[in-house]
Structures are given as structure tokens and as C-alpha cells.
Image (cartoon, helix red, strand yellow):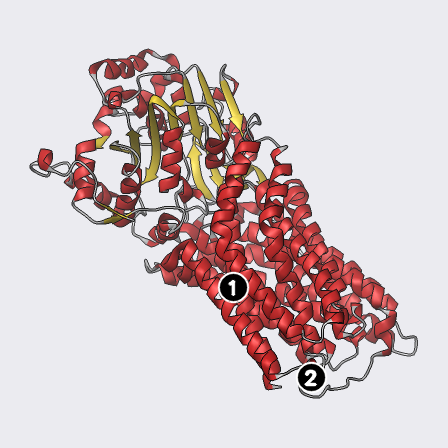
Amino acid sequence: MKKINTLFGIFFASGFAALAYQIYFAKKLALVFGSQSSATYTVLAIYMTGMAIGAAIGAGLAKRTRFPVRMYAIAELAIALYCLCTPYIFSLAHDIYLMIAVGYRPDSSSLVIYQVLLGALVLLFPTILMGLTFPLLVKAAADSKSCIASISGFYSANTFGAASGALLSGYLIIPALGMNGTLWLSSAIDILVAVLGFLLVSEAKTSNDLPAKVHEQADPHVHGSHRFGLLVLLVVGALTMMMEVSTIHLLAVVIGNSTYAFSLMLTCFLAGLALGGRYAGKASRRSANEHLNEALFLLTCTILCSTFMWQLSSLYFFALAQITVPHSFWLREFLRAIPAIIIALPPAFAIGALYPVSMNIASRGQHDSIGFPSAINTLGNIAGVLLAGFVLLPAIGGFHTSLLCGIVAFVLLLISTWNTRDKSAPAFQQYGSAIAASVLLIACPKQLDLNVIATGINTYFRPPYYAGWKMIEHAESADGGLTAVMAQNIEGIEFKTLTTNGKFQGNNAMKSGSEMAAQTGYGLIPMLHLSNYDKALLIGYGTGVTAMAIHESGFKSMNIVDLSRDLVNISNRHFADVNQHVASQTGVSFFYTDGRNYLSLTQDKYDLIAIQLTSIWFAGAASLYNQEFYALAASKLAQEGVLKQWFQLKHMSKRDLGVMIASAAQTFRYVWVYAVGTQGVMITSNSPSAFPNSQKEERLRSMDTNAKIRAYLDLYPNGVGSIPEALVLTPEQVRFMISSRELLLSNDNNLLLEYSTPKGNAMKDADFRDNLDYLKSFASKPSLKQAATEPALMN
């Protein structure tokens, strides 16, 4: 028994390392292929495919080998050694991808084929090895545990390890060690796992040296239910990923979509699976069919009950907004965790409880026969990922995807109840669960009040000004999340606000001091630095106002890149009056991919590259503020080209401001900093011609005669003259700022800004004025000309 418990502990550690690998793979491949949903779900499907193949191979090995623990240890060692090489493998895959993609549009669907092939090249080897470990360890426990107890024990141990990996990697390990450090730690854990496995083998020459087999009483219904067990595994495999995708999609609206929020959601889901698997092992003394019916009833009820929780979770945040929540990041994360646990954990628990019993039935209770059923379950996972991500979310949304999962679980319950009916038993005893589930299905809400859900309270723990407004249009997708237009009629004027997952994107308010003036300024400030107006690239569309300002400044062509087609379409329908129908202007083209992927694949050179995001702290957005991105952007600028980048001054620490500016200055020789409204703008270039001069200022002032722009310039106190006045720091002052402090750089390895900027949301609003004064302090330092001309930076 001691050795079996050791194996459970080993598989816990293996699950921890495997989840850390998965996070590493996902983040790195997002940089290779882009973070659009087609790439994300394709990579996940490949990951699951490798696991399915591995499970099938593991089934054959489990039947033939007398030393399953030795085979397991070899597999773990091979995984560790391969993963240590993955930084070089990913770099090679990226180079190959860039060569293959020449001649394709950066958002071409044809590229998915190459993503599949290259993803398979990178991921199949380690995931096949990961897939075969489970059947091998279950076989190793054949002489000491019943089949269902073995399945339950190893499944829950491994999943508990994965949940721990999700939590600690997201909140501690990656922020502390970076991506490569996390990879090395995970590989070290796997090597230790392999060593422990080899030590166990050296103590037990054969599997028969393990404790004597406990002979379980065979269930006469297990063999007859074999095919139904396989069906349940396939369907529940699909439901698992459909619930994971839809739940995380909706939780991103409810609790936010920072990188921490995704770690929290994944942890809750995996913890539920692990707890359910543990429960299944404790309840294994009942007959398999009774256990199966109970698990299906539990799954149906928890999914349907979760439909009540979404609106209640929003009421929870409304209640928190009525009190003063301390400005503590960790306290606020704890408060966000509560609805995540309540919503995500119960259905996951039911899925975890269903897995061991259905696996036991499908394998006919034989330890060495779980490989094929495990592969079937994983094939269901693949189908669930693709169906939810590419079909259901865009077609019916996250809530109805969850409701559909509940209906499918209910149908499985009805089939199972009918198959196992006993004419001698009372009718209520046989059909009571199905009747109760029917009542719950009828009673559960069929629609979700998105007006209540998409409030954005979760970000700052207070209601935004548009809370309570009517949602007049929305769209859901894996790429865009929940894009919505909130509207309110005030004194006969319809005011509209565009949101993503409840977070502000822009509005149509034409008044002094409004966001409209700032968004116009983001597009006009580059005119002080531009020498040529041939090609412009804008990453991030929003309401389209900044795109309009850039277009009206005189560019012959402008490419607009946005991850969300929904956002672009909705903006063009509801904000065309304020963006002056820029989408239909000559020379304007749209590409639906992430900005970094576009820059990697495009062959064009641009006079202006403009970055206009909604928040740096959105998961993945900070990659546009890393060293590698700045180097990439510099390579895509024309000789006298300029990069313009928005950044937030509110809810941003001084340290993060310094890191961001220093990271840009590592690539660009000249950096200017502006403050527009309550936000910042950074202008960077390597060309001396980017310095402002009288000719450029005159061209900017000529915009005062542009009929489309004039109304927007009137929003400034001094008209167009207010734009040059927004300058905060010159390149010389920026160099002084950097040389006076030891500043870290944010890059694709340490992900410094991705894990630091979400903590700024817990800061007080007064930090905007503090940050502006902090930046201005470097403009008033004496002897600037004696400051270092090259930044002193730390890698």
C-alpha cells in the first residue's frame, strides 16, 4: 500500500509539471501562431490528440509489460528532456512558419493548416508520452486496488497536481521565475518523478512484488454496459471541454480577463474535477450502474443549477460596489475567486465523479484495458474544444452553450435510467432522479440578462457610469469575448458606450473633457513626428475614432488590425457617425488577427504603426509592450517611420511605467511621452527626422480646416494647439529618467508587465495625477545635457 501511495504522490507531481508545460506551450505558441481563437483551439486540439494517441499506445504497453512503473519512469524522463529543448524547437517552428506564410494574408484561414502541421510537429511527441502514463500506472496498481479505485486515485491525484500547477504557476512561479525558469522547474520535477519511479522498480523486480491483489466482487452489469460506458466517456469528454470553454468565457465577463483571472478559473475547474474523482473512489462500493446514474444526475443538476448563478454573481459584485473594498490586490482576487468557485467547481466536480465510474464500465473493470476508453474520452475532449470554440460560442453564446451541455447530460441520464430499469423496484425509486432533473430543466433560466452581467464592476469594484444602461446589441465569440453597446437616452440624445467583457472601449459623447477628445488626440499626435504619409498600420479599432483621425491626417492607405470581427462590425454600425464611416474610406483595409502575428507575417513597411488597446492588463495584451515586440515593430517601420503606442496612466504603478518606457528605449533611440486626457501616448523612432519642427506643426494646425476633424478639435481648450502642449517628456528627458534608475525590461521570458499591470487595478484613482507628476519631474531636472546618452538597463 505504501508503494501505491507513493505512485499517487508521483502522479500528483507529474500533473503539476504537465499543467506548467501546457501553460508554457500555450503562451509560446501564441507568439508563434498568434493568439486568435483559431490558433488557440487548434493547439489545444493537437494537445488532446497527442494525449489520445498516447492513451491508446499506453493500453497496448500496459497489457504487454511486466514493469509498467519502469515504462512510466522512462516516459516522464523523455518528457522532461524534450521539454528542456522546446525553446529551440519553438524558435525553429516560428522560423518555418514565417517562411511558409509568405504570400498569405496574415489573417488567412489557410494558415490554420500550417498551424496544425507545425503544432503537431512540436506537441505530439511530449503529449503522446503524457497520454500513455495513465494506463501504465493503473496497471501498476492492479495487485492492490480495484479498477475503479485505481482510476479514481490516479485521476484525482494527477488532476489535483494540475490544479496546483495552474494556481502556483499563474500567481507565483511564472511571475518569480519567468517562462524559462518555469520550464526548468517543471522539467526538474519530471526528472525527480522519473528517478523515484526507477527506485520503485529497483525495489520490486516485477509488478507481482507489489501488495497482494484485492479481489473485488464483479458487477454483473458492467460487461453488459461496456458500449454505453464508451458512449458516456465520449460525450462527457466533449461536455468537459464545452463547459470549460463556455464557463471561462462567461467568467471572463464576470470576474475579469487578466492573466490571473484565467489562472483562477482554470484552478477552480481542475480542482472540481479532482474532488469529483476523489469522491468517485470513496463511493465505489455501490454497483456500477447505480453509481453511473447518480453521477449523471449530479452532472445534470450542477450544470442546470449553474445557470442560476450567473446573475447572482453580478448581484454579488453590485453588493461589493456598495461598500469600500480595500485597495488590496490579494483581497480583491479572493473576492473574485468566490463566484468562480461557486460557478465552475460544482459541474467540474460532477464530471470528475463521472469519469472513474464510466471508465470502469468501459474497461469492464480490467486494469490493463483502460487505454482505449481513455483515448475515446480524449477524442470527446477534442470534439468539445472545436465545437464550443468555433461553432457554439459565435452561434448561441456561452450561456446557451452551458444550457445545451445540461440538456445533453439530461438525455444521457434518461438513457441510463431506461437501460438499468428494474421492473421489480418502485417506479419512483427508478425514475425519481430523472423526474427531479426534468423539473430543474423546466425551472432553470433560458436567457441570461446581459445587462446585469456586463457591468465591468469586477475591474475596479465600483459601477462604471454606464451601469444600468440598456444593452442594445451584443455579440459573443472566442476572440472578442462579449462585445456590447450600452445606450441611454439623456435629454433626447442617445449616448452609447462600447464595451468588451464589461470594460470600457469608447463612447459617442461629443463634449469637452470627454474620451472623444483623447481618442482623436491619439491619432493626431503622430503628425508632430511624421515625415511621410504613405502607409499606416493601426492595431486596435475600438470605436474607430482614432482610425478616423489617422486617416484624415493624410495617409494614402491604412491597414487596421483587430482580433475581434464582432467589435469592428458593431462599431461600424453604432459609431459610424463619430468615426466618420472610416471603414468605407478608400485605402482602408481590415485584418482580423492579433497585432503581433500580423507584424510577423506582413512584408510591408509602414510610416506609422499605431497601437490602440483597451488595457495593457488584458491577458496577452502586454506582449505588445515587450522588448521582442518593439524589435519586431522597428523592423516593420519605413526609414523615417514612427511607432505610436497608447498606455494607461490610471491604475498603473510608477515601476510599470518605467519598465514600459525602458523596454521601448532599448530598441528605439528616440522616445517622446505625451499625456492626453488621463491616458498616455509614447512616440518612438530611430530616425532623427522624427523630431517635431515648424513644418510638421503647420501641417497639424491645418487640420483645423478639415471639416471632418474640426468638431473634434473644438473639444480641446486651445483647439489644435492643445496637442503639442500635451508633451511631457522629450527623448533627452526620457534618457535621463532611465539612466537615473535601474529598470528591468519586460520581455517574452519574464512577462513582467503581463503579471504586474493587473495589480494596478487595485490602486486608487489618484495614481493618475501622481504618475503624471512623476513623469513631469524628469522634465524639470537640471543639467539634462549632462545626463547619460544611453540608458542603463537591467535584463
Residue for point 42% across, 39% down: 614
- Furthest residue in direction left, as rendered: 783
Q: Quadrant of residue 334?
A: bottom left
Residue for point 79% across, 62% down: 230
Callout 2 amino acid: Ser
Where residue 425 appears, as percent x and y from the top left, is 88, 78
Residue 105 drawn above or below residue 621: above
Q: Please name the residue that numbered disc 1 is placed on.
A: 17
Callout 2 environment at 10 Å: few (<14), some (14 to 19), or many (20+)?
some
Task: Say left or right for 738 vs 594.
Answer: left
Callout 1 amino acid: Ala
Residue 521 drawn above or below residue 738: above
Where residue 269 appears, as percent x and y from the top left, is 57, 62
Where residue 643 appears, as percent x and y from the top left, is 34, 29
Task: Say left or right for 332 vs 82.
Answer: left
As rendered, which of 299 and 433 lies closer to the eye?
299
Callout 1 environment at 10 Å: few (<14), some (14 to 19), or many (20+)?
many
Q: Quadrant of residue 237?
A: bottom right
